[in-house]
Image (spheres, coloured by chain):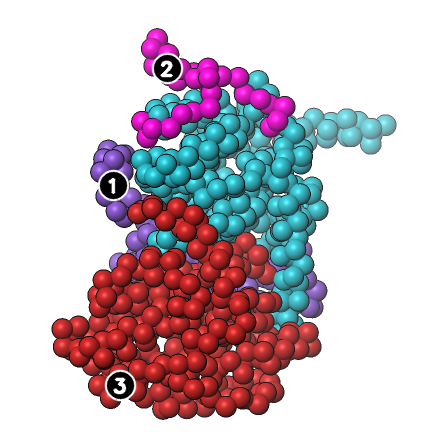
Amino acid sequence: MTAADLKSEVSAALVERLTALADDELVLGHRNAEWTGHAPILEEDIAIANVAQDEIGHAVLWYGLVQELTGQDPDRLAFFRGANEYRSSALVELPRGDWAFTMLRQYLFDTYEAELLPRLMRSAYTPVSEVAAKVNREELFHLRHSALWVERLAFGTEESKSRLQSALNELWPLVPQLLAPLEGDALLAADGIYPDPAELAAAVLGRLRTELNRLELTLPALPAPPAAGARSDRGEGHLAALLAEMQSVARADPAAESW
Amino acid sequence: MAEQHMAANSAPTEASAEEARLAAFQARIDAGEKIEPGDWMPSEYRRQLIRMISQHAHSEWVGMLPEGEWIASAPSLRRKLILIAKVQDEAGHGQYLYHAAETLGATREEMVDALLEGRAKYSSVFNYPTLNWADVGMIGWLVDGAAIKNQVMLAGASYGPYSRAMVRICAEETFHHKQGQEMIRRYAQGTPQQRQMAQDALDRWWWPAMMMLGPHDSDSPNTPQLKRWGVKIKTNDEVRQEFLDEHAPELIEAGLKIPDPDLRFDEASGHWVHGPIDWDEFWNVVKGNGPCNAERLAARRQAHDDGRWVREAMAAHAARQAPPASARAPRTGASA
Amino acid sequence: MSAAEKPLTGADTQWPRWEVLKKDSERKPHQAVGSVHAADAVHALLMARTVFARRPAAVSMWVAPAASIHAFTAEELTQVPAHSEAEGGELSRYLVVVKSTNRRSMTFGDLKGEVEASSVRAALDLALELAGEEPVLALWLVEAGSVVRSEPDDADPWFGPAQDKTYKQQSVYSSRATASKDAAEGVPR
């Protein structure tokens, strides 16, 4: 199906969901790009810059689908919405931390995408299935890379294992919010546009539990899954600080139509 | 007596053997052959190349920082992508150049240590701060524009790995220059704030870029020997003239004013003529007293220190998997 | 001792070096393009893709530890003694990479094929035969057992996406004439 086939409430739900997908990619890409020039070794500096470019590229694609539905320009969406209008998850907003934190966060997100994207490639909404295929192609390498790092750090030195465990203690409790549905996701699932959120969450958590146990890491207890729509709940202010910097040049000259 | 006689005879033989090797080496260069890793070369050639190549590598690596600072606030998604790609390329270029230096026997550990301990030089142009967003575009236009002139020349260098690294870099560097020009041209015709941003960037980057091409020929003692050995094909002033002739008119055409009151076009020679360069500032910055020298090295050191546990963890993991190091006598480490 | 031979003791190193062979297309052979520093073979392969496939085109990537490469300079190649038949011992396979031109290039040499012999000396003889009439200005014998290769299935996800990243390809940037004009007319990006 295409945009013309969508009922208005389904279209509204889809805009929310696409915005969340785009916002996650943009924020994560932004965090990864913070490593440029500061990575542990030259080759990995190049690697993380690639992951960052891929993710921002994915954000451009998902914002593009929003634009098809609402007419809103992707740059306006990225640079002129406040933290309370963003729909990104807390997992991607946290500061980059150390290399163990960044690689583990990447691994958690890449595993989530490894389950999400093949399902989205079967979306009844054609533009979503097409973008998902493009994104998935790049995600395959991301997962190879982040999985390699998590394994190396888990079985490297005492220090690397300890840092990885600290990172997991902080990140694992945020996974349920990443997987929690938005209010309109049920509607999208009913129309075959988006996968069933509960089934997706179970697949992601199952896969992660198996792998993290294999790496001999301890999984902290998970909080109860948040209510649908929890991404709008801005607890900590990491995103506000991030956007203040990210949007500073664009907002200083809002009349500029082209950069 | 007999030993003295023999000693007296062997010295000239050694000297003439060395002369013969030097002559053969020069003949290879004159014939356009590439000198490859493992080939005989004068120790001075090796020393000069390690110096040049590692300095070049350090410049790329440190050069990531002034522009990298602006990735976080790049004002459009496309500009953000472009800037990450550009800074990534700089890392990549450093990577190719460190490789070329390694083929001459320098190790990356030694080169990194030399840089972080302040013993190694890198291009002073990266010791200036990037004060507004348009600096990113101006660096692309001027600094990468200057770098391209240099790199195109060095792509013909006699040492194979350096030449190959330069050819690869040249293929990628043009994008850096063009995206910078595109940005600045757009801002020069854009909002009042954008125009002012672009002009301000030019005011601050023009002279550093001119000086980046190196001291005047009269102050470059290494150049004649480097030219004979096919490592440099043109002198600093020659390259600087090419840079000026190409970029001065383009900047003026874009609607910007170059901060050189003595700049003029000389009809007779068909060349642009620039005003005097403040070399005191250049040498001051080269010696480490530039506005950002300390900051740049501190950032590099911090990243290196923060990364130590990571490098060690990877090495520990690998040591557990791999069989013990081969008992075979090591070669000098094959390189391309 | 070069970095390639430093033992991995957990001391702070830049990791060993791995030479990279990249195949640009089905028509071209694997070519030596440079090296990467990595702690192990799989990581080296991922880093080779990272460093050398940022822009099109590639279909296959191989890496080999620098320490497993036997390199011969032009001068060494002119001094190869006649091969003696009486060399017993296990057969090993070697990849043969040859530099045959001084023409300006991004790559050092091309993969010519593989040989199998019971000694490096014998392998060199076979490699020179393999090179045939072409000039051999420098040559590598790469221990085949140490080479790690990308899979055919990796080609699309690893090398395909670079085609779409046009924002970093210089060909998409307008020339001077159109850029000034576009800027004057406020044409959006």
* Stretch of the chain drawn in magenta: B253-282
Chain of the residue under label 3:
A
Q: Please name the color used to draw chain C.
A: purple
Counting from the top left corner in percent of width and height, residue A76 is at: 33, 57
Give, as a three-letter code, the residue at label 3.
Leu
Q: Nearer the viewer, mark 2 or mark 3?
A: 3
Chain of the residue under label 2:
B
Task: State the residue lying farthest toward the left.
Answer: A4
C80 over B174 or under it: above or below: below
Mark 3 secondary-structure assignment: helix
Residue contact between numbered discs 2 and 1, judged by CB atoms under 8 Å: no
Quarter of the rendering containing residue A161: bottom right
- Residue that carries the numbered disc 2 in the rendered image: B265
Point out which mark residue B70 bears.
none
Q: Nearer the viewer, residue B149 or B203?
A: B203
Q: Please name the color used to draw chain A.
A: red
Q: Please name the color used to draw chain B.
A: cyan
Q: Is residue A75 left or right of residue C178?
A: right
- Whether labels 2 and 3 share one chain: no
C134 over C116 or under it: above or below: above
